[in-house]
Amino acid sequence: MILAHDIDGDGPAVLLLHSGVCDRRMWEPQVPALARTHRVVRPDLRGFGDSPMPAEAYADADDLVALLDSLGVAEAAVVGSSYGGRVAMELATKHPGRVSSFVLLCPAHRGVDPDEELQAFGAEEDRLLEAGDVEGAVQLNVRTFLGPDGDEATAERIAQMQRRAFEVQLAADALAPGPQPERVEVDPSRLAVPTLVVSGALDLAHFREVAAVLATQVPGAEHVELPWAGHMPSLERPDAVADLLLEALRR
């Protein structure tokens, strides 16, 4: 399966991987700036946006390699937000020659156990979905992950993307035997590419801890904490993140 995707610009490839509450539309504010100097590839991972979730075994990292192969891209700089950050590290773990550098924005990482706050969020999301209150689960995600700089229009954009993700994923839950994602274990000490880890000072404590751990364990990683940011800095202050990404890509 070739993931649904958009391509803009020309130049060295940069692969933008969305968060778990969004889809490829989350990067629209950064695309014009990045596309002036780069070939910008934005996929929807399986279960998000326009990429369905078939009842089969798959790995997000393999899906991304199939997409890059179809585009004739041998190597790309990879920017991953939250869940997309975890997938970026899985890509480099399974296919190390395909990643030239990382920018990890408030990344997820299985190597750090969820704390009580994040477990409580997950339990409440499960409760709402089991009760059939999809809209309640959508709004829970928006409240939890959008930082204080996100306005009402941004909150509604995230709600639209999260609503779509639930629609695709709940449909997949009804399949038999259902989707079978591969679990890829990431060893940060083996991610030997230039890496910038970005955290938000107003993010959940779990993700701040993940950023600190990765900055320590990934060889040579840089760590920048944005004092104004929650969990979704690219949507909270789009221009500031576009500038940050361009500077990281130049380096």
Image (cartoon, grey):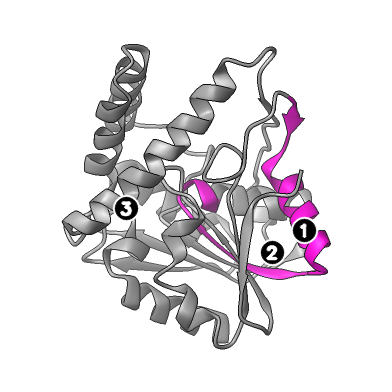
Residue, disc 1:
96
Mark 1, secondary structure of its residue:
helix
x and y percent of residue 26 in the render? 42, 58
Label placed on residue 33: none
Tag 3, which secondary structure? helix
Crowding near the residue tagged with mark 3, few <14, some 14–19, many ≥20 C-alpha atoms within 10 Å:
some
What residue is rendered at 30% in x and 34% in y?
A: 138
**Foreground mark, 3 or 1?**
3
At label 2, which amino acid type do we have?
Ala
Q: Earlier in the sequence, mark 2 or mark 1?
A: 1
- The quarter of the rendered structure image containing the N terminus is top right
Instruction: Give the class, few, some or many, for how many residues have Cα within 10 Å of label 1's Cα (few <14, many ≥20).
Output: some
Given residues 200 and 81, the one toward you in this image is 81
The answer to whether residue 123 is seen in the rendering is yes
Q: Residue at x 28, y 69 (%)?
A: 237
Q: Earlier in the sequence, mark 3 or mark 2?
A: 3
Dot label at residue 157: 3
Q: Residues within 10 Å of mark 2 (few under 14, many from 20)?
A: some
| Residues under numbered marks 2 and 1 in contact, where contact means CB atoms less than 8 Å apart | yes
| Range covered by the magenta-colored residues | 56-85
Callout 1 amino acid:
Pro
In depth, the one of 203 and 164 nearer the eye is 164
Q: Earlier in the sequence, mark 3 or mark 1?
A: 1
Q: Residue at x 78, y 66 (%)?
A: 71
Residue 57 is one of the magenta-drawn residues: yes
Foreground: disc 3 or disc 2: 3
- Which of the labelled discs sits on residue 192, or is there none? 2
Above or below residue 161? Residue 211 is below
Q: Quadrant of the C terminus?
A: bottom right
Q: Amino acid at mark 3?
A: Arg
